[in-house]
Amino acid sequence: MSGIFGVVSAEDCTQTLFCGTDYHSHLGTEYAGLAVLGEDFSRQIHSIGQSQFKSKFYEDYKKMRGNKGIGVISAFDEQPIYLHSRFGPFCIVTNGLVENAQELVNELLNKGISFSEVSRDTVNMPELVAKLINQGQTLVEGIEKMFEAIEGSCSLLLLNNEGIYAARDKLGYTPLVVGRRGNDWAVTTETSAFPNIDFEVVKYLQPGEIVLLKEEGLADKKPGSGLAQVCTFLWIYTGFPASSYEGINVEVVRERSGRALARKDKDINIDLVSGVPDSGTGHALGYSAESGKPYRRPLVKYTPGYGRSYTPPSQEARDLIARMKLIPVREIIEGNRIVVCEDSIVRGTQLKNFTVKKLWEAAAREVHVRPACPPLMFPCRFNLSTRSIRELAARRAIHSLEGHELEDVSKYLNHHTQEYKRMVEWIARDLEVTTLRYQTVDDMVKAIGLPKERLCLYCWNGQCPLKGI
C-alpha cells in the first residue's frame, strides 16, 4: 500500500505538503515524491529504501514554491509522474494495484501510445493510469473510464492548473479523506496527517467519487456509488492507530479486537500480555483490559531506521528488519507465560524466527500467539502485499496436510471444522508455540463495526467484492 497527500493553500503550501506526506511513512518503503505547482511544476522523487522521507526531502521542499502540491510514500512505483496531456500538463500520484496492467498496456501500445517509466521491469502504474485518463474527452470522463478499465484498485490525486483532482477507487478499497484549515484544503490517505497541521475532516470520499480541491473551495465532480467494500486490513494492520476510515478509529478497533481474543481464552493461565510492536500493541491492550492480566513489553521495538517488516518487496529485506527491530527484555520474559498479540500471520517466518525464537531464548515459560485476524488464505488482489499463495503460512499447512496444493480450500475456512483445527495445529507446531488461536471473521467484523458487506474480506474468504461493478 502507498500513502498519498495533497494540499491547496491560499499561500505557499510546501511545508504543509512536506509534513502531511511524511505522516504516511508507515505505508511505503521504496520511493517517495513531491510535486508542487506555482509558476511552473517542480518535482522530486527519491528512493527511501535505506533512509527516511524526512532526511531525503528536507532540503528539497525548501526550494520548492507553489500554492498547491501532491506527495506520496510509495510501496513500489517511482512517482509523482508528470504528463503533458491533451488537457494540459499534470502530475499524478496513485495508491492501489492494477491487476490487468499488462493487458491495458498492450491495448495502449497497439494504439501507438508509448511508455517511458519502468518500475522493476514493469510499466509504472501511475504512468499507466495517467495515459488511461488521457483517453477521455475531459479529465473527469478520463478518470471514470480508467475506473471502468482497471481490475484491482486505484485511488489518485491529480495536480494541474485548476487544483487537485481527488478520486477514490470504485470499490472503495483504499481511503481518501478531505480536510480543511481556514481557506486551505487537503486530501489524505491517513487522517492522522491532519491534527498536527491543524486540518479538520470535512468528508470521507465515497467509492468512485471525484472532487476538485481549488483555491475557491471544494467542488464535487462526480458522486460516489456508496457501495464501499473497504480493506479490512486497514484497521487490523496497515493503518496508523490515530487514523480513522469511514469515521471509525483504528486504535479503538484494535482494542475491541483484543478484547474479543481474550474472551475466547478462558482456559489458559498466563502471567502477562504483550503485542508485537507496533500494530499488535492496540490488540494487546484490549486483550489485557478484558483478561485483567498486565500488559508488558517483553519485546521492544528499536524505532529509528526500522520500518515495517511486512511491506518491503524482498524476503531478504523483510528478514533483516524483523531481526533487527525487536530487542528482547529478558528480565520481563524469563519464567513467564506470555500471550503475544499479533496483527496477522502472513508468511509466519518472521514471527517464528525473530519473535517467538527470541522469547524462548530469553527463557519464556509458555508462548501463546493470538493473531487479530483469521488465517490468510488468498493473496491480495487490490494492493501490493502478498503476491503468491505459496507465501502464506495457512497454505503451506494445507499443502503439508493434503500432500498437494488444494484448489478448493472451503473446508479450511470454517473455524468449526476438523480441517481448520488440524491446519491451526500444524501452524502452531511450525511456529513452535504453546498455543495458537486466530480471531474469527465474525469477531473481526464486529470489532470494526461496519456491516460485513461493506468490508473486503478477500484475503480470508477469496470472494471478490462487488464483482462486475
Image (cartoon, rainbow, N blue to C red):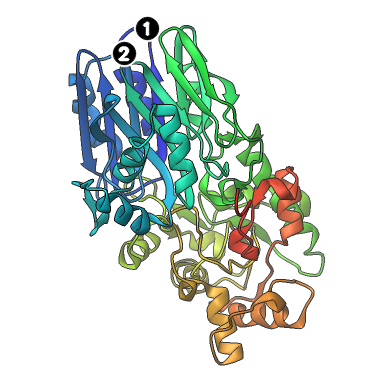
Residue located 32% across and 51% down the image: 76
Residue 349 at least partly seen: yes
- Residue 23 visible in this rendered orientation of the protein: no
Neighbourhood count class around disc 1 (C-alpha, 10 Å): few under 14, some 14–19, many 20 upward: some
Q: CA distance from mark 1 to mark 2?
A: 6 Å
Q: Left or right: where does residue 121 sit relative to residue 342? A: left
Of residues 41 and 319, the one nearer the viewer is 41
Q: Are marks 1 and 2 in contact (CB under 8 Å)?
A: yes
Which residue occupies the foreground of this view, 267 or 13? Answer: 13
Image location of residue 404, percent across then percent down: 54, 89
Residue at left offset 55%, top offset 64%: 333
Q: Residue at x 39, y 16 (%)?
A: 8
Q: What secondary structure is found at the residue carrying circle 2?
A: loop
The amino acid type, in three-letter code, at marker 2 is Asn
Q: Quadrant of residue 68?
A: top left
Q: Nearer the viewer, residue 379 or 307?
A: 379
Q: Is residue 321 left or right of residue 455?
A: left
Q: Amino acid at mark 1?
A: Ala
The residue to which callout 2 is attached is 67
What residue is at 57 percent from the left and 61 percent from the top?
344
Q: Is residue 232 above or below residue 462?
A: above
Q: Which mark is residue 424?
A: none
Q: Position of residue 351 (x, y in %)?
A: 50, 67
* Precedes in sequence: disc 1 or disc 2: 1
> What percent of the width, then of the height, locates residue 433?
60, 75
Q: Residue furthest bottom?
A: 403
Whether 250 is drawn above or below 223: the answer is: below
Disc 1 element? loop
Q: Residues within 10 Å of mark 2 (few under 14, many from 20)?
A: many
Q: What residue sits right under mark 1 in the picture?
A: 10
